[in-house]
Every structure is written in structure tokens, then in C-alpha cells.
Amino acid sequence: MDYLTLVLGLLFALTFYQGLSYLSRKSKKLPPGPAPLPFIGNLHLLGDQPHKSLAKLSKKHGPLMSLKLGHITTVVISSSGMAKEVLQKQDLAFSSRSVPDALHAHNQFQFSVVWLPVASRWRSLRKILNSNIFSGNRLDANQHLRCRKVQELIAYCRKNCQTGEAVDVGRAAFRTSLNLLSNTIFSKDLTDPYSDSAKEFKDLVWNIMVEAGKPNLVDFFPVLEKVDPQGIRKRMTVHFGKVLKLFNGLINERLEQKRLQSGNNDVLDVLLTTSEESPEEIDRTHIERMCLDLFVAGTDTTSSTLEWAMAEMLKNPDKMQKTQAEIAEVIGKGKAIEEADVARLPYLRCVVKETLRIHPPVPFLIPRKVDQDVEVCGYKVPKGSQVLVNAWAIGRDGTVWEDPLAFKPERFFESEIDIRGRDFEVIPFGAGRRICPGLPLAARMVPVMLGSLLNSFNWKLEGGIAPKDLDMDEKFGITLQKAHPLRAVPSPL
């Protein structure tokens, strides 16, 4: 009898608490959302695939939804219309960052253009990125580098073609992306294509992405900051330390070369010259941290996008054949593809767009927050709220996309929708002030790498796996990886 009384008492207390939460939500004019439990709020609803859990919840509560994740009010955006409201119409109000505790390792958030607030230092660093790394002129000047790295990727695959071995597509793409960036910035390869050093760096970058994307109790209960109960910040400190030590050595090496009057006129030279002439814009610490941003964000997102694109090609052989036929007709079977050729390959461009629609590299974009109360569509987003834009859910919205889970590049043939942040139905790179600065490089790299792989070989899945049986499960982190690496065997065209 006492046990029954206790259970009834707990049920009453829980019901009473949820009733109070509902009334509190209404009185504060918060966006709709699931009723929170005491202490943990809605954390129990996230699961190990939060992008999917929150997409499902948004179908019940709407495209502007609020949750209580521990002690943190979180607002989730799940439609293109609501994303436009937040990322375009009220971009400035939503332009601050919600900084995960993991990014406090080595105080990265204080130096990184990704996490700095929109202010003079952030503007200086963005200007330097846009002018010296991702401008059209700089990208044109480095085109020969990218071409060479893509040819090295093809040469690596050709060796496997001759021996009949499978290619780990994600790892091979990562090596290419890594060496492309390292040549652009440092004028040298950071990894030998045939050594394990690329795997070590890939694992290091992936560990950083996993730790940064892992649900961290400190982010939900800031009072735990000093305890770091899961050890995430501690591990991140080790990972960041290894990468920063590498960049520190490369910068010291370059300063010695400059002292001997033998520069390279690459990105590092430009950054070091700028830091000497205008130290208030960028200093050595910011250069090291900018390199950390570029290598972590630029290598992982590009390689995972290429891996998903190849996975969709192998899953849908008719789409692969259609892409190969277009390239063979326009460029010539087996010939190298250059960046200028992509403009003449509309189906290839549609394949890349469709890949980014259904597999955005960063499912929640990078989290934002509001520094003061903001009104959105009649609801109040309270000061300090974290804001998540579920790009994964937006790309699969059945009210916008017909047959949204099917891979249909053709849907973009008659569509003006683009991926550059002006159209909110597909926003893999974000939009507004905080749009990913690396977009111009990714837009050049991915179609050339994908087109080159398809125009150099035929491909089949390792072990005779049938296309319909290819595992397309996702592994959640800040970036969305294939849960099982794609291994495919190249054969002569």
C-alpha cells in the first residue's frame, strides 16, 4: 500500500510539474515544444541521432520548437521558411555563437573565426579569409594545385584498380583534401598518400569532431564546468595540442626561410606579412588557430560529402551511369576534368546538390545563440537561448521536396535552388553573416573529385554487395559521417 501511495505521489508531482511547465511556457510566449521533465528537461528525447529525434519532434510541435536541454533553453529551426526568418531577416540578432565546453580547450573559442562574436576582430579575420584564401583570384591561382592533388587521388585508385583492391573512399578523399589545404597554406604535403600518417591525422581530426559533437553534460549543466565529468575538454586539449604543435613547427620553419629571404608567396606568407604590417588584425596565435579551423573543418566536411556522393552513386547505379555518360560526352571518357568543365556538366552539378540536400555535412550547422530576447513569428526566444538549425530536417522536408528520401538529382534540373545560402531549402553551408567561408573552395573541389573518380573507373561495392544492400547508416558528430566506411573496387572503364 505504501508503495502504491509513493507511485501515485510521484505521478501527481510529475503531472503537476508538467502542468506548471506548460503554463510557464504559455506565460513566457515560448515556441511550442515537449513538456520537460524535472532537472533533465527534454534530454531524454535526444537519443544517439539528435538530428533525427528533433526532426521527428518538429512534426508534432512545429518548425519553431523550444526544448529544455538540462538547464539550457534550446530553440530548434526545422523548416526553410523559419530558417529564412532567423538566418536572413533577423540574422544579426541570431549571429552569436553557443560555444560548446569542448571548445574551451586551449581557449580555442577566443581566437577562432568560427566561435568569435561578430565584432571587429571577427570582421578582420573573415576579411583575411575571404581575401587571401577563398577569393576567386586566389582560388584561380591555386587551381593547378587542386588539379595535381586530384590526379594523385586518381593515381592512388589506379594502383588499387590494377590489384583489384577496394578503395576506402572517405580516407582517400580525406588525404586529398588534407594535402590540397596544406599545399595551399604551407606549400607542402602533410601526408604521404601511401603512408599511415594520413590515417593518423584523419583519426585526430575525426576525434576532434566526435568530441565537439558529443552530448556533453557541461553544455546542459554549466555548473559542472570545473568538473568536466566526461573528460571531453581534457581529451580535446590533447587533440588540439597535437595539431597546434604541428602548425607551430611549420610556422617556425617558414619564419626562418623568410629570414633567409626565401618565401613561397603562399597563404602562410601572406598571413605572416599581414601580421607584421597590421598586428591588430591578426597575430601569430590567430594564424595558428585559423589553420586549426581550416584543417578541421575543411578536410572532414569535403571528404564526408564525397564519400556520401559516391555511396549514392553505388546505391543508384542508373544515376552513376547517367553521370558517367554526361562526362564522357562532354569531356571524353577517361580524360581529366578541370574546374572550368563543371559549368558544362549540369547533371554532375545536380548530383552534388542532391548529395548536400540529403546528407548535409553539418546536420545542425554550428549552434547559435541570442544575446537578448528576440521575437520570432509571435513567439519569444529568451536571452541566452541556444539556437539549432536542423539542416538535415530542412533538406528532407516532405512539404518542400517530393519523395524527399529518394536520391533524385533530376529534381534540380528545372530548379533555380542553389546551395550558396540564398535559398533556404538547402543550406549545407549555412547562410547570412555566419555562412561557411570555405563554400567557394568546396563548390570547386567536390564536383571535380567526384567527376574524376567516375570518369576514370567503373566502381562496384567490395565483397559483391548488391547496390540495394549498401548500408547508409549515419554516425552523428558535428559532421555526419557514414557509420560504416565506403569501400569500393575500381575497374577499368
Image: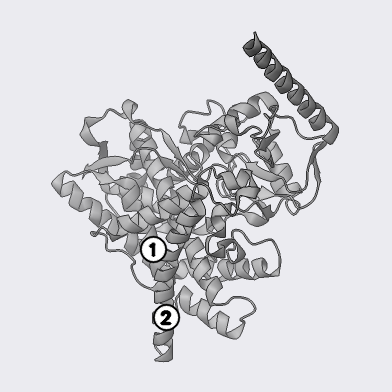
Q: Which residue is mark 2?
A: 252
Upstream in the sequence, badge 1 or badge 2? Answer: 1
Quadrant into which the N terminus falls: top right
Image mark count: 2
Task: Find the residue positioned furthest to the top.
Answer: 1
As helix, strand or loop, the secondary structure at mark 2 comes to: helix
Q: Quadrant of residue 395?
A: top right
User: Horizontal and vertical percent for residue 426?
Assistant: 58, 41
Q: Which mark's residue is nearer the viewer, 1 or 2? A: 2
- Which of 283/171 is in front? 283
- Which of 280/8 is in front? 8
Which residue is drawn at the image coordinates 54% and 54% (left, top)?
102
Query: For this view, does 364 lie left or right of residue 84?
Result: left
Amino acid type at image mark 2:
Asn
- Which of 73/52 is in front? 73
User: Horizontal and vertical percent for residue 208?
Assistant: 45, 54
Which residue is drawn at the image coordinates 31% and 63% (left, top)?
191
Q: Is residue 201 above or below residue 272?
A: above
As helix, strand or loop, the secondary structure at mark 1 comes to: helix
Task: Find the residue positioned furthest to the left.
Answer: 163
Mark 1 is surrounded, within 10 Å at the Cα level, by few (under 14), some (14 to 19) or many (20 or more) other residues, namely: many
Circles 1 and 2, Cβ within 8 Å, touching? The answer is: no
Task: Find the residue positioned furthest to the bottom.
Answer: 260
Mark 2 is surrounded, within 10 Å at the Cα level, by few (under 14), some (14 to 19) or many (20 or more) other residues, namely: few
Residue 180: which disc? 1
Residue 370: which disc? none
Which residue is drawn at the image coordinates 47% and 67% (left, top)?
140
